Image (cartoon, helix red, strand yellow):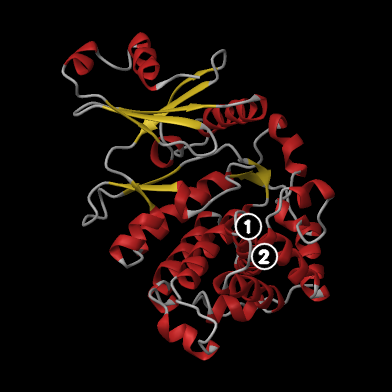
Amino acid sequence: MLSQPEAIRYLLGLGLLQAGDVVQDTVTVANVSRRHLNWRVTTQNGPGYLLKQGVGGERAAALEREAAIYRLLNAVPGFARRYVPQLHLHDAENGVLILEWIAGSQNLREYHLRRGHFPVSLARIMAEALGRLHRHGPGGPEYEARSANVPWIFSAHRPTLRFLQDCSGANLALIELTQEFPDFCEEIDALRAAWHDDALIHGDLKWDNCVVSGNAASVRTTRLRIVDWELARTGDPCWDVGSAFHDYLGFWLQSIPITGTMPPERFLELARFPLEKMHPALRAFWSTYARAMDLDAEATERWLIRSVRYAAARLLQTAFEQMQGAAQLTGNIVCFLQLSFNILKRPREAAVHLLGLPPPHVRLA
């Protein structure tokens, strides 16, 4: 693994950094590790780089897949240049992936949190990006083997022993609570059975994986790019759409100061980020995506219902992820679970009353 000084020497050897930058002490290196060991290398006036290093065989293989995905995205017409960071190099021998680091950027969650509003323009850009990606079709033979890997949350209510061994106390309580509602479990089983393998999907779309840069006051210069493609695979495009819906719902829920003594009827009025403030962005996102996919009226409604149901599954997944290191469930997480169940039972009502979308009219078989 490259250390901080080694990362600088490595980039110098590749010609991506200039010796003058090092001599003038304008190079900054920061550890921005997540799943991988990551170095962010920036200069005062030049380009920036993200060095991702896979630690261990499994993560090195994940890095290989991500590099292959970036190469595939370059073949999607009008996609890579506009919506993803530039791939500079994949060094398979040393297990290093070098991507463009976007100067002055922040993820979409930080952007919304700091500004307190939800721009329609960014929602449209995300929808256009997903439309271009999903219209490209499946990723090809090298990804078809991964298409059987439906989202793990579809099996969390029927856990294996291996899954249970990695669960926290809060996650065990979450499994037990889920299993107390057979209808909930049946709805999740139905999602798994209805999974499609229609397109190349991001697979882990969320605001944390969307990077905003440019002049925040100018729609023309603001850019949104999608990062962290290692979980991309052939799958159901509605999963990515539902993931986008989920982030608005989750952001709203997490802004509610829930306590044990607070009556549920006060939850809505105390939200720091009310859903009503998000509705224009949600409507713009969905209408733009439906047009980008060239969906007819019937397909639009079918895809909407499927996407809303996947949003419910993502709420459940977020509950598991946030409780991974916790001993007990929190009030907000119980609300995530309850909202997930309610959406699965009544997706049409959720589309209208929660997401603020036009009423669906197509009856599903």
Q: Residues within 10 Å of mark 2 (few under 14, many from 20)?
A: many
Residue drawn where x is 55% and y is 64% of the image: 246
Q: Position of residue 111 (x, y in %)?
A: 34, 56
The amino acid marked with disc number 1 is: Cys
Q: Using the image, tell me which numbered label, if any, was put on residue 336.
A: none
Determine which residue is flagged by label 2.
306
Image position of 231 (left or right of 116): right
Residue drawn where x is 75% and y is 57% of the image: 154
Nearest the eye: 116 or 309 = 116
Is label 2 in a helix, a strand or a loop? Answer: helix
Instruction: Classify residue 328 by image quadrant.
Output: bottom right
State how far apart marks 1 and 2 are (Cα).
6 Å
Instruction: Classify residue 322 by image quadrant.
Output: bottom right
Q: Using the image, tell me which numbered label, if any, was put on residue 238.
A: 1
Residue drawn where x is 60% and y is 70% of the image: 336
Q: Is residue 315 above or below residue 79?
A: below
Q: Position of residue 247 (x, y in %)?
A: 50, 62
Specify which label sits upstream in the sequence, 1 or 2. 1
Q: Residues within 10 Å of mark 1 (few under 14, many from 20)?
A: many
Image position of 118 (left or right of 190): left
Q: Position of residue 172 (x, y in %)?
A: 73, 61
The amino acid marked with disc number 2 is: Arg
Furthest residue to the left? 24
Image position of 36 (left or right of 185): left
Q: Position of residue 34 (x, y in %)?
A: 50, 39
Q: Is residue 253 above or below residue 219?
A: below
Is label 1 in a helix, a strand or a loop? Answer: helix
Nearest the eye: 208 or 171 = 171
Residue drawn where x is 58% and y is 54% of the image: 240
Q: Are marks 1 and 2 in contact (CB under 8 Å)?
A: yes
Q: Is residue 268 above or below residue 160?
A: below
Nearest the eye: 249 or 135 = 249
